[in-house]
Image (cartoon, helix red, strand yellow):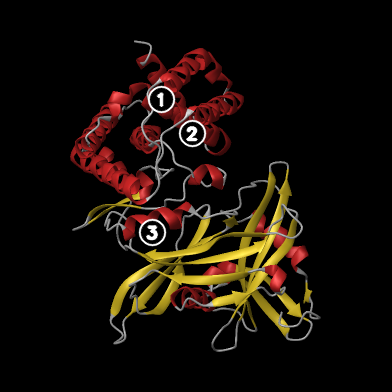
C-alpha cells in the first residue's frame, strides 16, 4: 500500500462492506453499507515492518452522510493471536501476501497512535494536502511512561478503546492508559474530550485524568472544497479492576443489600461535577427557542416510541400534558452536562470514590445537540431511570418478584445527595424532572423495541408509573 500504482486482490471494495456491517460500532444493523473513501492517514511503524493506514470512509443514507474511521495494519505474516481481528487476507501487487487487521488490535497501530499523541506529532493524508491531517495534543503536565503492551477493551458498541500497560523509565509498572478511537466522526469538537478535559483542568478528581487527544481534518462531504475538523481519539488514565456501578448495583439487588448510602454519595458527586462544569464552561439562561427545541425533541421521541410500541398511545394525552407543564415551568440556567448518564458510566474506585466516565453524550444524537448547553436535570433523570433499569433487569431474571422498593430507595437517596451538595433539590423542579424522565423512558422504548423486545416492559411500566404519579 506504499505505491499508488499498487493494487490489492481482493480489493477493499470487495471485502470492506461486509466487515464493517459486522462491527459492533456500526449503527446500520442488518444492512450492507455502500462505502466510499474520502480520505486517509498513513502512520509510521518505527521498525518499518508493518504498514499502518487510517481509512476515512463515507456512507450515504436517507438520514444523511456518516463518516467512519477505519485504522488498518498490513503484515507480511499473520499477527500471532490476531485471528479475531483479521479483516482480509489479500495479495499486494508489489509486496505479495498481506494480512489486513483491524488496527486497534495490532500493537503496531496502538504504539503509533499513542506516540503520535504523546509526542504531539503530525501526520498528513495519503491523498496529499486535500486529504487533511491529524495532530497529537498532550495534556499539559502529563507523565505516563512508555507502552509495554496493548489490548482492546471488550464490550463497547460505538467506539473502540485500546488499553495500554505502561512502565516508567526503570521498567516499573506505571498507571495504565486507555485511548478511545472514535469510529463515527463528525465536524466539531467531541464533548468527551472537551468536557472531561475541562473538568480535569478545573481540578476535579471525579473524572479520569486526561492524557491527550488526536485531532484531525478531512474532506467535508457537505461541500466540494471545505474541510471538516474534529477529534479522532482521546487518551486518559485507565482504572483497572474496578466494576462499573451497574454491576455493583445488580449485585446489591441480588443480595438484597440497600444501596442508599452509595446512591446518596453518587448524587453528591453528580452535583459536584455539574457545579464544576458550570464554572469551567459557558452557561446561559434558557430562552424561548431553547424551550421550544427541547420540547420538540421530546414530542418527536413520543412519536417514535408510539410507532415502535403502539400501546404507548394510551398515554399520549397525559404525556403531552407533562411536556406542556415542563415548557411552562421556570427553567434553570443551561450548562454543559454528561448527556448519557447512567450507572454504566460511573466507577466506585477504592480510596477515591465515584468517578464519572464517557462524556460523549448519546452517540446517535447529532454533535450539535450534544455540545450545546442543556439542563443538568437531564443527567439526574438519566440516573433515576438507571436505578429503575437495575431493578427491572433483575426482575426479568426473577419472574414474579419485585425490586421496586430497592429502586425507590436508591432513587430517593440519589436525589437527597444531589440536593445536599448542590443546594437545590431536583424535586423542586418536579415538572421538568418528570418530563425528562418520561423523555428518557421513550428513548428506551425505541431502543428495547429494536434490540431487546423482552425488556420493553421496563420503560413502558415506568411511563405508566410516572404518568399516574403526576395525575395526582
Along the horizontal axis of the image, is 179 left or right of 144?
right
Q: CA distance from mark 3 to mark 1?
A: 35 Å
Residue 263 drawn above or below residue 229: above
Q: Is residue 32 visible in this depiction of the protein? A: no
Q: Which mark is residue 444?
A: 2
Instruction: Determine the residue located farthest toward the top in the rendered image.
Output: 472
Answer whether labels 3 and 2 touch (C-beta < 8 Å): no
Residue at 27% from the left image edge and 41% from the top image edge: 271
Q: Is residue 228 visible?
A: yes
- Residue at x 43% of width, y 32% of height: 286
Query: Residue drawn at (81%, 81%), measured in percent from left and top?
Result: 5
Query: Mark 2 or mark 1, which is nearer the start of the sequence?
Result: 2
Quadrant of image for the C terminus: top left
Q: Quadrant of residue 53?
A: bottom right
The residue wearing badge 3 is 197
The span from disc 1 to disc 2 (Cα, nearest Å) is 10 Å
SS label for mark 1? helix
Marks 1/2 in contact by CB < 8 Å: the verdict is yes
Q: Secondary structure at mark 3?
A: helix
| Residue bearing the label numbered 1 | 462
Numbered disc total: 3
Looking at the image, do the residues carrying marks 3 and 1 touch, with CB atoms under 8 Å apart?
no
**Image position, residue 216 (x, y; %):** 58, 65
Who comes first in sequence, dot 3 or dot 2?
A: 3
Number of the label disc, if any, that sits on residue 149: none
Amino acid at each position: 500500500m506504499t505505491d499508488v500504482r499498487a493494487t490489492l486482490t481482493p480489493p477493499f471494495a470487495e471485502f470492506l462492506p461486509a466487515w464493517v456491517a459486522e462491527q459492533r460500532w456500526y449503527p446500520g444493523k442488518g444492512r450492507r453499507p455502500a462505502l466510499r473513501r474520502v480520505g486517509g492517514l498513513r502512520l509510521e511503524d518505527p521498525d518499518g515492518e508493518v504498514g499502518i493506514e487510517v481509512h476515512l470512509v463515507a456512507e450515504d443514507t436517507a438520514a444523511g452522510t456518516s463518516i467512519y474511521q477505519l485504522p488498518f495494519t498490513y503484515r507480511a505474516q499473520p499477527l500471532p493471536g490476531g485471528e479475531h481481528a483479521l479483516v482480509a487476507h489479500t495479495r499486494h501487487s508489489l509486496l505479495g501476501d498481506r494480512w489486513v487487521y483491524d488496527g486497534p488490535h495490532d500493537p503496531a497501530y496502538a504504539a503509533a497512535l499513542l506516540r503520535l499523541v504523546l509526542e504531539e506529532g503530525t501526520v498528513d493524508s495519503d491523498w496529499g494536502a486535500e486529504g487533511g491531517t491529524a495532530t497529537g495534543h498532550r495534556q499539559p503536565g502529563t507523565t505516563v511512561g512508555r507502552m509495554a503492551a496493548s489490548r482492546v477493551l471488550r464490550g463497547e458498541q460505538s467506539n473502540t478503546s485500546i488499553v495500554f500497560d505502561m512502565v516508567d523509565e526503570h521498567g516499573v509498572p506505571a498507571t495504565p492508559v486507555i485511548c478511545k478511537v472514535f469510529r463515527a466522526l463528525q465536524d466539531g469538537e467531541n464533548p468527551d474530550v472537551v468536557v472531561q478535559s475541562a473538568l480535569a483542568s478545573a481540578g476535579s478528581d471525579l473524572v479520569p485524568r486526561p492524557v491527550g487527544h488526536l485531532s484531525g481534518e478531512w474532506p467535508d462531504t457537505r461541500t466540494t472544497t471545505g474541510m471538516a475538523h474534529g477529534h479522532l481519539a482521546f487518551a486518559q488514565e485507565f482504572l483497572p479492576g474496578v466494576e462499573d456501578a451497574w454491576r455493583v448495583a445488580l449485585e446489591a439487588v441480588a443480595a438484597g443489600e440497600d444501596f442508599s448510602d452509595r446512591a446518596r454519595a453518587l448524587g453528591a458527586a453528580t452535583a459536584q461535577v455539574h457545579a464544576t462544569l458550570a464554572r469551567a464552561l459557558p452557561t446561559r439562561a434558557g430562552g424561548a427557542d431553547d424551550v421550544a427545541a427541547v420540547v420538540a425533541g421530546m414530542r418527536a421521541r413520543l412519536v417514535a416510541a408510539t410507532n415502535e410500541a403502539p400501546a404507548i398511545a394510551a398515554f399520549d394525552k397525559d404525556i403531552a400534558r407533562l411536556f406542556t407543564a415542563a415548557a411552562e415551568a421556570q427553567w434553570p440556567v443551561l450548562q454543559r452536562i454528561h448527556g448519557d448518564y447512567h450507572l454504566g458510566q460511573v466507577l466506585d474506585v477504592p480510596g477515591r470514590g465515584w468517578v464519572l466516565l464517557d462524556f460523549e453524550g448519546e452517540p446517535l444524537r447529532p454533535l450539535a445537540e450534544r455540545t450545546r448547553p442543556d439542563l443538568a436535570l437531564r443527567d439526574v433523570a438519566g440516573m433515576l431511570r438507571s436505578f429503575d433499569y437495575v431493578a427491572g433487569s433483575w426482575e426479568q431474571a426473577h419472574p414474579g418478584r419485585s425490586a421496586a422498593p430497592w429502586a425507590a430507595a436508591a432513587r430517593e437517596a440519589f436525589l437527597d445527595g444531589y440536593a445536599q451538595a448542590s443546594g437545590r433539590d431536583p424535586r423542586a423542579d418536579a415538572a421538568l424532572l418528570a418530563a425528562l424522565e418520561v423523555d428518557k423512558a421513550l428513548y428506551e422504548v425505541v431502543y428495547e423495541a429494536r434490540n431487546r423486545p423482552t425488556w420493553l416492559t421496563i420503560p413502558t411500566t415506568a411511563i405508566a408509573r410516572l404518568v399516574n404519579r403526576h395525575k395526582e
